[in-house]
Image (cartoon, helix red, strand yellow):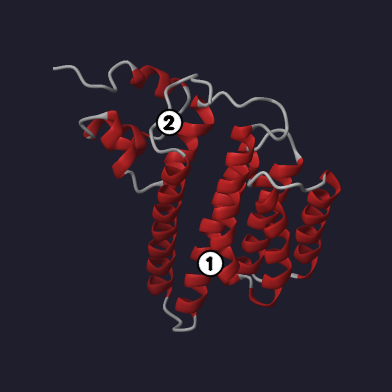
Amino acid sequence: MTHWTDDLVPWLEKRNACEEAVAYMRSQPTRRQAWGRCKRGDWMSWWLERTLVVPQRRGSPLHRKLVAMSCEFSRRSLRNAGKYRPALDAALTTVERWAAGGRVSFASLIAADSAAESTARSARGAAWSAAWSAARSAARSAAGSTAWSAARSAAWSTAESAAWSAESAARSAARSTAESTAWSAARSAELLAQARIIRRHFRDMPEIGKKS
């Protein structure tokens, strides 16, 4: 019996897709169900990055969509930003306005990037550092012509911020097993949240090489 992934497996292996992700795809009866049920935002980001044809010009509809997605990832990390939250919130608000099609100058986007970087110099602690990194990635993706690396960085930083925050709380109980469990649970929850965000922006699983 044929499976919808039969022709995809060589393509996936050539691009070093992780075995766990390939096994998950093989376990799903249809392409739509694989996308709709996926709980791993990192797998979905990997797929988007390697299948969508992104126009190499700043401000294209797809570029703005990716920036908006980055901002959603980054917003989730602000809960761990502590006293730096207002500065990062202001930077993200500027980027979100641009992503939504608002009239935002290039200078304003650069200023948002600089503000996030300035916050980084003051931030201490892994969760805070990951939070500013996520926000800066969103700002940088708007200022540049290519959004993929920044979107991926924002997603990764947000997941790490959540995990570091959970581990820190567990560490106060001085139990290494609790730290590890908290890290894993927080990261899994964040990846699930990211998967849901991605599905809001990309309802269907993109086909390989299809322009958007």
* Residue lying at 76% horizontally and 47% vertically, measured from the top left: 103
| Mark number, residue 136 | none
The residue singled out by tag 1 in the image is 164
The residue singled out by tag 2 in the image is 17
Residue 156 seen anywhere in this rendered image of the structure: yes
Where on the picture, by quarter, is residue 85? bottom right
Q: Is residue 186 left or right of residue 31?
A: right
Between discs 2 and 1, the one toward the N terminus: 2
* Residue lying at 59% horizontally and 47% vertically, measured from the top left: 68
Q: Is residue 133 left or right of residue 193?
A: right
* Residue lying at 72% horizontally and 64% vertically, measured from the top left: 90
* Residue lying at 78% horizontally and 56% vertically, measured from the top left: 112
Where on the picture, by quarter, is residue 125? bottom right
* Camera-side residue of 109 and 46: 109
Secondary structure state at the residue bearing disc 1:
helix
Picture coordinates of residue 156, whole percent (x, y): 55, 51
Quadrant, the N terminus: top left
- The CA distance from mark 2 to mark 1 is 26 Å
* Camera-side residue of 72 and 79: 72
Picture coordinates of residue 40, whole percent (x, y): 39, 47
Tell me the kind of residue under disc 1: Trp
> Taking 168 as reference, is 56 above or below it?
above
